[in-house]
Amino acid sequence: MNRIELRELTKDYGTHRVVDHLTFDVLPGRVTGFLGPNGAGKSTTMRLLLGLDRATSGTATIGGRRFTELQAPLREVGALLDPQAAHGGRTARDHLLILAASNDIPAARVDAVLEQAGIAPVARRRVKTFSLGMRQRLGIAAALLGDPGVLLLDEPTNGLDPEGIIWIRELMRALAAEGRTVLVSSHLMAETASFVDHLVVLGQGRLLADTSIGEFIEARSSPRVRLRTSDPQRLRAALEGEGWKLSAAPDGRWTVDGVHAEAVGAIAARARVPMIELTDERASLEEAYLDLTADRAPFSAPG
């Protein structure tokens, strides 16, 4: 099974604890967003999962095994941690051929992922001539090379143009729909909200949240209704009679805090107030994330 399991995972660098007793699972069939401020321990956690660093205590396993125990790791786990990792003097195709040979992956697969990543036309160019976005696509191609059941992607949209962002978003959702496990670290909240199903949030090395994106936002949103009406005075009177307050919004609309659209609609209907627009408004992922991590960011500008 492609399940990622962390149990009491801890990593110390001297007296500094970077990862603090993390316990959570990343399940197949969904895209899991891995969020947290700079220094929260996300990259270290991924390195521990991939055997690039040794845990102080606890375990990190993929399908019940440590990464270092996998016989052909690229066939089971694909990872993008550093798009600059490819040797600049090699061509993109040669870079992938070397990786393929190390895990007994046929050369035909190299051509397939170059095509899939959209860089087949530049496959014989040296990597040092690539832009950041092209290197990013090469890194994603390398992660896909072994057709793995588990993908670990650190900031996969970094450097990509709008077409590339749409491509990687759809790719991640398609991979999850095939039953693969997809863990994605990102700082771009609006973009993350467009493709993740589940969230794991860290702060100062500790687990702050492990929940669906809908539940995460709902837990940090106060009910608010945004509306437009041709008779705000009558609606204000009707709402005040029920204990609610109608407030003007900067965009010409009106808002009511602490209530849902269904209740406001019922009040308006009883008072026969015409409604032009009526919708529930909830916090964005960015607002909910900042609400949770505001006191957990080691680096922040005064504001």
Image (cartoon, grey):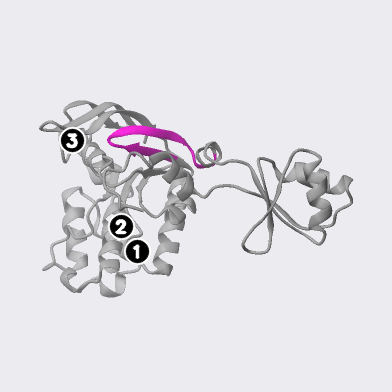
Residue drawn where x is 79% and y is 47% of the image: 265
Q: Is residue 202 magenta?
A: yes
Would residue 263 appear left or right of 213 to someone viewing this image? right
Amino acid type, label 2: Ile
Q: Quadrant of residue 135?
A: bottom left
Asked if marks 2 and 1 touch (Cβ < 8 Å), the reply is yes
Disc number for residue 68: 3
| Secondary-structure class at tag 1 | loop
Please tell me whether residue 199 is drawn above or below residue 83 in the rendered image: above
Would residue 210 appear left or right of 227 to someone viewing this image? left
Q: Is residue 71 magenta?
A: no
C-alpha distance separating marks 2 and 1:
7 Å
Q: Mark 2 highlights which residue? A: 140
| Secondary-structure class at tag 3 | helix
Of callouts 2 and 1, the N-terminal one: 1
Please tell me whether residue 80 is drawn above or below residue 130 in the rendered image: above
C-alpha distance separating marks 3 and 1:
27 Å
Of callouts 2 and 3, the N-terminal one: 3
Question: Residue 26's spot in the image, x, y percent?
Answer: 38, 35
Please tell me whether residue 114 is drawn above or below residue 23 in the rendered image: below
Asked if marks 2 and 3 touch (Cβ < 8 Å), the reply is no
Magenta region, residue range: 199-214
Q: Mark 1 highlights which residue? A: 117
Residue 137 visible to the viewer: yes
Camera-nearest residue between 98 and 143 = 143
